[in-house]
Image (tube, rainbow, N blue to C red):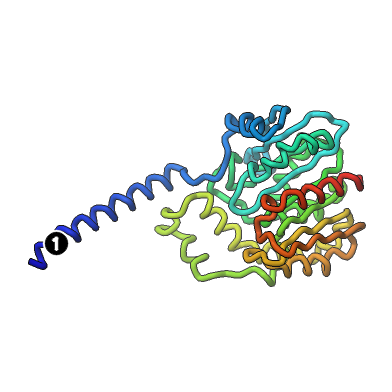
Amino acid sequence: MKTSFWRPFLRRTAYLFTLLFTVWLIAVQAGCFTMRTPDRAWPEKLRQKGQTLSPRFCDVPDANGRMIHSVSIGTADSLPLIVMVHGSPGAADAFLDYLADTSLSKMARMTSIDRPGFGYTEGFGNPEPSIAAQAACVRAVVNTIAPDRKVLLVGHSLGGPVIARFAMDYPEQTAGLILVAASIDPDLEEHPFWQSAINPPPLKWLIPKSFWASNYEIKALEGELRDMMPLWANIRCPVTVVHAKNDQLVPIGNAAFARRVLVNSSDLKETILPDGDHFILWNRYPVVREAIVDMLGKR
């Protein structure tokens, strides 16, 4: 009696598990869970949020020939340029609300970049662990859109060290930095056991490409940040740090680190929020927007 019940039950369970596992594996390998917005969807998304300007898309080769994808709003050369760099994982659409803001687009041109390994930059799922190389990718876009001009950069999470490295390596092109919940202190980088476990095959094949790419670059981040330690004194432009006290992913100690190392910044400003967690780029939009407007006023 018991055998006749359990045997069909176990067969059905095994079949269901195999089916779900196969569907998941196909979905992952087919590129689902990409966390990116295709170019064709941008105009409608911006229109729904009130933006009357049409987006422009640009693919620029970096030093290695990799095509870096970006989305821009505004064309007036007389306006300053704001370059926005997303976190991990993520894509250019992390800054959709900012590009859709018509009052911002009257004050500045705005460009949001797909970092290597993410979005529609060539080589989706193949991250670039070098922060210096990522900063060079940002520069390739800047040199195409606004050659010979200083730009304001906004970086969220892992985008923070990327724009900081840009300011270190290309100070002549940097007008100011806004570090939003930025991961910049190497001593605060944690390495949970699963970080290494999911890196090689076969577990790698079960992880969506955007998440695997994120894990790969975060795993390398501590070493990259340590390499940057002697270079913080090179940053002389205005810097605004926006961070939430209850950020569980990037601890508030990163803001204190910024105070210690940005000793030569011409104008260091902090906005520490009592709440808002790591996602203040979205759930504290007015605060980040105010930081951008304030930085534009310093140009």
Q: Is residue 11 left or right of residue 77?
A: left
Q: Identify which residue, 20 or 215, lies in the foreground.
A: 20
Residue at x-position 79% and y-position 29%: 75
Classed neighbour count for the residue bearing mark 1: other residues with Cα under 10 Å, few (<14), some (14–19), many (≥20): few
Residue at x-position 27% and y-position 53%: 16
Query: Which residue does the numbered mark 1 point to in the structure image?
Result: 7
Q: Is residue 278 visible?
A: yes
Which residue extends farthest left?
Answer: 1
Residue at x-position 62% and y-position 34%: 45
Residue at x-position 65% and y-position 53%: 87
Q: Is residue 34 left or right of residue 83?
A: left
Give the quadrant of the N terminus. Answer: bottom left
The percent coordinates of residue 166 (x first, y second) are 77, 51
Mark 1 residue element = helix
The percent coordinates of residue 275 (x first, y second) are 70, 63
Please determine whether, in this image, residue 230 is positioned above or below residue 160.
Answer: below
Q: Quadrant of residue 179?
A: bottom right
Please determine whether, in this image, residue 185 is positioned above or below residue 63.
Answer: below
What is the number of callouts on the image? 1
The percent coordinates of residue 46 (x first, y second) are 66, 33
Give the quadrant of the C terminus. Answer: top right
Q: Is residue 8 left or right of residue 253?
A: left
Q: Identify which residue, 99 or 221, lies in the foreground.
A: 99
Dot 1 amino acid type = Arg
Q: Is residue 74 left or right of residue 196?
A: right
Q: Is residue 227 visible?
A: no
The percent coordinates of residue 172 (x first, y second) are 87, 47
